[in-house]
Image: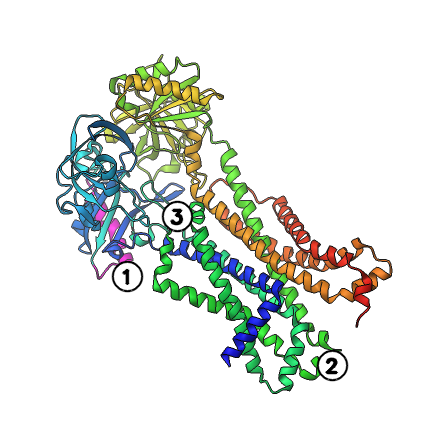
Amino acid sequence: MIRNYIKIAWRNLVRNKVSSFINISGLAIGLTCLLLIGMYIKDELSYDRSFTDAKRIYRVNIDVKRGNDRYVVGHTPPPVGNALVKNFPEVESYTRIFMPGDEIIHYEINGRKNSVTEKKTLVVDANFVKFFNYPLVAGDASTCLNGVHSLVITQQAAKKYFGDASPLGKTLVLNGNGTPYTVTAVLKDLPKQSSLQFDVLRPAASARVIKNFDWSWIWLQMGTYVKLKPQIAGNPARVAQLEAKFPKTIAQLTSNMQFGKPYGIFKLQPLIDVHLYSANIGTRYFQQSDIKYVYIFLTIAFFIMLLACVNFMNLSTAQSAKRSKEVGIRKVLGSLRKQLIRQFLVEALLYSICAGIIALLLTIVVLPAFNQLADKSISADVFLNYKTFIGVVALVLITGLLAGSYPAFFLTSFKPVSVLKGNSLFKASGGAFFTRNALVVFQFTVSTILLICTIVVYKQLMYNQTKDLGFDKDNVVIISNPANLGASEETFRQELLKKPGVINASISSGLPAESSFGDNYVPETNPANITELTGIDLSSFMVDEAFVPTLKLKVISGRAFSKNFADSSSVILNELAAKQIGWENPIGKTITYPGNNNQKFTVIGVVKDFNTDSFRSSIVPYALFYTTSKTYNIRSSYLTVRIKPGDYNATLNAIQNKWKQFAPELPFDYSFMDAEFNLLYRSDQTISKVLTTFTVLSIIVACLGLLGLAMFTAERRTKEIGIRKVLGASVQNVVAMLSKDFLLLLLIASIIAFPIAWYAMNKWLQDYAYRTNISWWVFALAAGLTVTITLITISFQSVKAALANPVKSLRSE
């Protein structure tokens, strides 16, 4: 019996080539989308799960409330890990990380001396490798970071620095200070599905800045991980109970401190949640995504698959006139309804299997392009896994059953007598018209929603690029780590100012979109609006007198730094800092930094608020402290050069040549500030590209179904068209007649789609502190595009039917 079902199904597939092509193409596209998004989601959900004790490891976050502001960060004070281990038996161990910034590494390979800027260096506690149980190629995880000048590198870094030679025992020189670091271990290359990426590890004992602030409970610059006892880990209720005990104990530990008491509440976040559940947690250490994008992509894949199934249902029921006589004859000859249902389900499964094979091949072919689009590195080897194979087979079978269920029950519901008379077929199948119209409305609704979402995302990205940041990021070149020039740092800056393509240049410890230093300061007065605070948190840069004019910051009160004044103890605040402190006139007021022997700084100016992060984050209170290269007490980080627009290459070559004169042994690394800001929106840009791609695919699937329906509609109304033409109807009249029904359905779909799309995108935009608005023209554009695509899709068949000779359509019954 099954063999007979398959034979009949194959004959119908071959006989109805156009509808078969449309059905199989739609299902294949839908399945391809589902497979690609399924692999994307699987990749996202696998982050940080490869560690042996992944479920026992938690990141320590701090939930800070300062006045009316509240935020959560993944950076903690240095003492917190040790305090948790000593005071809470539930906490088994801890380890910490610190990001020192770009570091110059000098090495020798094949007899040649080289230097390179290493951007993926971490400073870590000695137990870091053992804590996470990173797999080693060589070395001992327990002791590899015990030495002050020990170094652990990945296989990739070992290949870069030493070629094929064994790296153990060999040395690398960091930052040109002449101190050699010895390679004591080599890690296997990190999995891509790790939220913490690095190539070089050096011990915390080697970092002077950590030694200086190891006591501080307000220096939020380190990442801290703890490992909980097995009976606690994975139990949210018990973890919450543990967290509830933190405030009292920490308060007791720091009760004797006049300054430096911790602020905020310490929270524990499971390591396996860090990648997808940290959208509102500030950090610069980790590769973070957002769980809502997983939901968004999963929803898109589901609806595209549903669109393909709807196409199948629509086309199958549209062919009811052809299949109804077959059903009637089979019933008269004794076929049971359940047998006919099986027949139609087998046909649907055959279509689905053909589509599944095509989809599998398509997925393998387009996977490299999808990886580039979605910023992934997914391998086609995933299909070699038997679990994946079983999942694909189940997906194909479910798709076939879903697509074929309604046609099977609908086509087998005809009464043989009514069908074989031939005069009441449309009455018998009239209910299908309503269902088909509802399904077409569903298709248009989904396509219109996706179009609106795509437009709004693109509009926000354009807003990100064009909104005033409070400074000018265009035509600004960033040169990393000019401090490696040593005493020649300021001289180099002065030499650059002599270049014809250079407008200005500044040396600073941080930059917008790069890095800043955060700490707590005590204002001269303590106004009523912050009476509960001991001070105010300020992010800060150490800058020279050229910083404000180089970035074109707007001074709205007081003045900028100048060499004509003794500004070594001066500070410039942004508007928000002055507002939060509560000063009506901040010029001349002082703030105190207890972390450095109660050093006082006098406010000499206020600049307009400026954005230093993506528009997802609100502007924060900022302070600019004056310094020169001679008075830096920390390693300077950036040389910012504003250049004239035009011949960028000539100016960059001139800067590079001058760099080589000063430091021929050091690499010349630069970037453009506007490009650095664009990187802040890399995830949004990826989402935009992926969303656009799947929106186009959903429209293609919907258009395939629309084309098939237009064909069957024209075929069903052939005689009507012939009569209208004989009575004088023009081609335009006929085309309008065939199109108006679809346009009416489109109008209904738009009415449904608009509020849904507005709600969805309004929720998405809430993640941005500064966002675009959802203008009326977005909906008009989406509707216009949908109408245009619809008319183009059905016009070919409509025009063909309108141009047909009416004699041919009317000469036969």
Residue that mark 2 sits on: 421
Categorize mark 1 by other alpha carbons within 10 Å: few (<14), some (14-19), many (20+): few
Displayed quadrant of residue 210: top left
At 61% from the left and 60% from the top, the residue drawn is: 705
Residue 274 against residue 723 in the figure, above or below: above
Amino acid at pointer 2:
Lys
Q: Which label lies toward us, 2 or 1?
A: 2
Dot 2 lies on which element? helix
Dot 1 lies on which element? loop
Whole-angstrom CA distance, mark 1 to mark 3, is 32 Å
Categorize mark 2 by other alpha carbons within 10 Å: few (<14), some (14-19), many (20+): few
At 66% from the left and 72% from the top, the residue drawn is: 320
Whole-angstrom CA distance, mark 2 to mark 3, is 60 Å
Displayed quadrant of residue 456: top right
Residue that mark 3 sits on: 376
Residue that mark 1 sits on: 235
Residue 176 against residue 34 in the figure, above or below: above
Whole-angstrom CA distance, mark 2 to mark 1, is 69 Å
Is 654 one of the magenta-colored residues?
no
Label pair 2/3, CB-CB below 8 angstroms = no
Where are the magenta residues, as a range? 230-256
Residue 122 appears in view: no
Choose between 324 and 260: the one closer to the eye. 324
Left or right, 340 with reference to 195? right
Residue 311 against residue 247 in the figure, above or below: below
Residue 608 against residue 3 in the figure, above or below: above
Of the two numbered discs 1 and 3 on the same chain, state the one appearing first in sequence. Answer: 1
Residue 581, position as x, y percentages in the image = 38, 32
